[in-house]
C-alpha cells in the first residue's frame, strides 16, 4: 500500500463471518488477498463453522453409503392365519 493513501480510499471487504465491512489494515499488507474475516475472532468462528459443516457432510456421506440400515424394509410380520 503506497503512502499517502487517504483512509477512505483504502480497500475494504465484507467479513465472511459477520458480514460486516472492514477496511484494510497494515497487518494485512502482505496477505490482503487472502483475508476473509475482519478479526481473529471471526476467523476462528469461521474455522469452527467449517469444521462443523465438514463433519456434517461426512456424516451424511456415511449415511449415504449404508442405505441398508436406514432404508431396510420393515420386518415381515408373520401372517397369522385365522383358525378354521
Ligand atoms: Zn467479522
Image: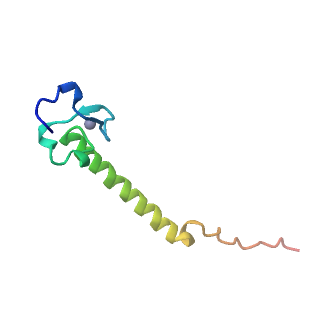
Percent position of residue 56, x then y: 40, 57
Rendered-image quadrant of the C terminus: bottom right
Percent position of residue 23, x then y: 22, 32
Q: Residue at x 20, y 40 (%)?
A: 41
Q: Nearer the viewer, residue 11 or 45?
A: 11
Percent position of residue 37, x then y: 25, 41
Left/right of residue 81 with respect to residue 40 in the rendered view: right
Q: Which of 74 and 25 is in front in this view?
A: 25
Q: Which of 76 and 69 is in front in this view?
A: 69
Q: Nearer the viewer, residue 39 or 33?
A: 33
- Asked where in the image residue 55 lies, by quadrant, the reply is bottom left
Q: Which residue is drawn at 19% across and 48% down?
A: 31
The image's colour scheme reads: rainbow
Q: Residue at x 76, y 72 (%)?
A: 79
Ligand 1: quadrant of the figure? top left
Rendered-image quadrant of the N terminus: top left
Percent position of residue 15, x then y: 29, 38
Q: Which residue is drawn at 38% across and 53% down?
A: 53
Amino acid at each position: 500500500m503506497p503512502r499517502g493513501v487517504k483512509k477512505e480510499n483504502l480497500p475494504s471487504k465484507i467479513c465472511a463471518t459477520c458480514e460486516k465491512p472492514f477496511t484494510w489494515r497494515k497487518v494485512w499488507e502482505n496477505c490482503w488477498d487472502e483475508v476473509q474475516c475482519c478479526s481473529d475472532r471471526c476467523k476462528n468462528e469461521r474455522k469452527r463453522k467449517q469444521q462443523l459443516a465438514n463433519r456434517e457432510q461426512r456424516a451424511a456421506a456415511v449415511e449415504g453409503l449404508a442405505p441398508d440400515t436406514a432404508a431396510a424394509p420393515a420386518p415381515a410380520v408373520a401372517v397369522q392365519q385365522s383358525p378354521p
